[in-house]
Image: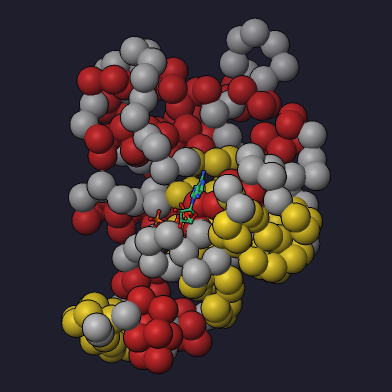
Amino acid sequence: MSVLSLSNLSVSLRGRDVIRDVSLSIGEGELVGLIGPNGAGKTTLMRAALGLLPFAGESSLAALSQAERARQVAWMPQAREIAWPVSVEDVVMLGRMPHMTGRRPSAVDRERTEEALAWMELTGMRHRAATRLSGGEQARVLIARALAQDTPLLMADEPVAGLDPAHQIATMQTFATLARSGKSTLVSLHDLSLAARHCTRIVMLGDGGLVADGTPAEVLTPERLAHVFHITAWYRDTEDGPIYQPLEVIR
Ligand SMILES: Nc1ncnc2c1ncn2[C@@H]1O[C@H](COP(=O)(O)OP(=O)(O)OP(=O)(O)O)[C@@H](O)[C@H]1O
C-alpha cells in the first residue's frame, strides 16, 4: 500500500517554476533519500506534498483533512530552533497530540514518548529545558517528537544536518529500523554516503525535476554526480555497504 502518492506535482513560486511534474509513490517500509544540490527543490517538494504550499497536480497527503494528515505523516522541517522553554519530554510528548483523546496522555502516549526519547538518546536529559540545549541536541528532540507521532510516514528535511557523526548514523539506523517494521521515511540529505548506506531508495532532484529514482547503486552513477552535483566521487562497494566520498568539483 502506498503511504504517499504524488502525481505530476508542479510548484511555481513568484512566477518561477520550482518543481516540474514530479510523480512518485512511496510504499510501506521504504526509507527514501531525497537528494539534490542546493536549490534543487527538495524542501519545496516536501512542503507541497504536505499541502503547505500551493501546487498543481495531486498529492495524496494534501487531500487529507488536517486531523487525518497528522495521523498519517510526521513532519520535521529544516528550521529546528525550539522556542518554548519547556522540558525535553514535554516537547516530545507534543508529538502525541494527534492521537490524544482526553486531556491526559494515555499509557500508549507515554510508551511512544519513552521509546522516542530512548531512540534519540535523550532519556538522560528529559527534564532539561529544550531551549537550553545545543543545536544538535535540539534537532534530536525534534526528531524524537516526530517519532513519537508514530505515523505510517515520516518526512524530514535534512534531519541529520548539524548532528555529530555518531548521532547521524544512529538517526539513519532508527529510520532503517522503522522501515523494517513497515513504516516509511522520506528524508532529504546532503551526505551521499549516508544516503547510499542507509536508504532503500534514492530520489534525485535536479533543478526542480526528477532526475532519477531507484536503488542507491542505480541512482548514484558517476555521470549523474557529474551532471547534477558537478562533482567526482570515490566509490567502493564494501562489506559494510557502499561508500561514497566526494572528491573534486567539476567546473
Ligand atoms: N518563497 C519563495 N519564493 C521564491 N522562490 C523560492 C521560495 N522558496 C524557495 N524558492 C526557490 O525555490 C528553489 C528551491 O528551493 P528549495 O528550498 O526547495 O531547495 P532545496 O533543494 O531544499 O535546497 P537546499 O539544499 O539549499 O535546502 C530555490 O531556487 C529557491 O530560491
Residue 236 pos. (x, y %): 28, 88
Position of 8 with respect to 143 (left or right) is: right
Instruction: Please name the residue shown 32% across and 65% down the image.
Output: 191
Viewer-proximal residue, 95 or 176? Answer: 95
Residue 126 pos. (x, y %): 33, 22
Residue 21 pos. (x, y %): 69, 68
Q: Farthest top residue?
A: 103
144 lies above or below 179: above
Instruction: Please name the residue shown 66% across and 27% down the image.
Output: 98
Residue 185: quarter of image: bottom right
Q: Quadrant of the N terminus?
A: bottom right
Instruction: Please name the residue shown 28% across and 81% down the image.
Output: 231
129 lies above or below 67: above
Instruction: Please name the residue shown 74% across and 29% down the image.
Output: 67
Q: Is residue 58 visible?
A: yes
Position of 106 with respect to 128 (left or right) is: right
